[in-house]
Amino acid sequence: MKFADVLGNTEVKQTLIAGINAGRVPHAQLFVSREGGGNLAMALAYAQYIFCADKRENDSCGVCDGCRKMLRLVHPDLFMAMPGSKRESDPKEWSSKHFIEPFREAVLANPYLSLEDWLEHTGLQDKVVSINAQTANEIVHDMQMKSFLGSYKICLIWLPELFYPTAVPKLLKIIEEPPANTLFLLVSENPDKIMATILSRTQTVKLNKIPDFEIMDALMNRFGVEMQRAQEIVNISDGDYNRAKWLSNEESNSQSVNLFREWMLAVYQGNIPQLLQFSEKFHGENHDVQKNFLVYALHLFRESIIKVSGAEDLARNTSSERVFLEKFAKTINPEAIIEIRGVIDDMVWQLDRHANAKMLMTALSLRMVPIFVKKK
Ligand SMILES: [Zn+2]
């Protein structure tokens, strides 16, 4: 990964590059960002720059042998450790090494991936995952070997907050005093949960929130998302590029669209038992589906207001949505819809703070019923 492919944090990149070029390479660094904030992408770009044989002023070259190996995550001097758990096919002494292939796949597909994505990718959703003691043994062993290509050896540890407690003591010495030309890049979303003994041995590289305009630009230019929808997605993604990408995915949308239809039907009928049942169902969906549902609701409400106001040139909808909006727009009161949009925005905020999804959804539904049933 090149620095150019990492969103935001221009100053952080410059500081990292200047450090390497001045020979100031701390032996243990902790890359911190919120989820979807690019900490892993930044650490990979950093490692690639270190390994690059033809460093440019602002980035790695992207074409030398070291870069090409990094672009496929197969550089022999890159050791990667990540949380896992014993699967049926794994030996009793499983370690991160058993997850290296799926990890390459997942990171190459999306260097902004979340722990949730990773668990889904590996089928470990119901397991307690950790970076275990066996992995720590292997880190200590491998990092003491000579580098294959004669430059640095880099150990990248994704989510050190998930170290199993017995793994940590094994690593303290090597992180404190690693062999020559050996670097540790730890990549964390929750530094508060990292053991203090590890934390105190690392230098923190803190990433700032990715600016909304950069995420919007990426959604529009890389994924062809319409401006208005990109704006709505950005508003609720709160700097989480991984979530923004997910929300912009058409396929993942269809689930939310169906949910929306089901919900609105119950609202029209003023069917309280069914709305309560819907809240249960909403509660059972994962966080992304819940948020996507709300983005979609915001989108359709906006489109319905435009329809009512007759400003058709501002409309951004698909043909199936137009059919829906024909009828839907006749039932709405634009002022009430604007108010509801505010309620939904607030709901997104609360969901992010782990408020109870069922209660939020029930409150929203009960607020919707009088608006729509009255107009019928
Ligand atoms: Zn290069």
Image (spheres, helix red, strand yellow):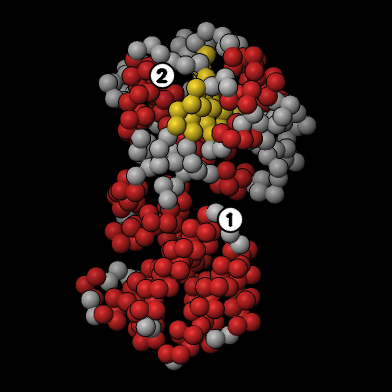
Disc 2 residue crowd, few under 14, some 14–19, many 20+, Cα 10 Å: many
Q: Residues within 10 Å of mark 1 (few under 14, many from 20)?
A: few
- Which quadrant of the view contains residue 49? top left
Residue at 37 percent of width and 29 percent of height:
12
Percent of width and height locating residue 184: 53, 21
Amino acid under disc 2: Ile
Say what secondary structure mark 2 lies in. helix
Give 336 or 157, whichever is nearer the viewer: 336
231 vs 199, left or right, is left
Residue 164: % across, % down? 70, 31
Q: Position of residue 95 (x, y in %)?
A: 68, 29
* 314 on left or right of 35: left
The reply to whether the residue tagged 2 has its Cβ within 8 angstroms of ligand 1 is no
The number of numbered badges drawn on the structure is 2
Of 30 and 113, the residue lying toward us:
30
Say which quarter of the image contains residue 90: top right
What's under tag 1, amino acid-wise?
Answer: His
Note whether ligand 1 is within 8 Å of mark 1.
no
Residue under numbered circle 1:
354
Disc 1 element? loop
Left or right: 136 as drawn, with respect to 107: right
Residue occupying the point 60% across, 71% down: 279
Q: Residue at x 64, y 14 (%)?
A: 173
Q: Quadrant of the C terminus?
A: bottom left
Between 280 and 123, the one lying in front of the other is 280
Please say if 116 is above or below 163.
below
Inspect this view and state whether residue 322 appears.
Answer: no
Tell me if residue 150 comes above or below residue 251 in the rendering. above
> Label for residue 50?
2
Q: CA distance from mark 2 to mark 1?
A: 39 Å
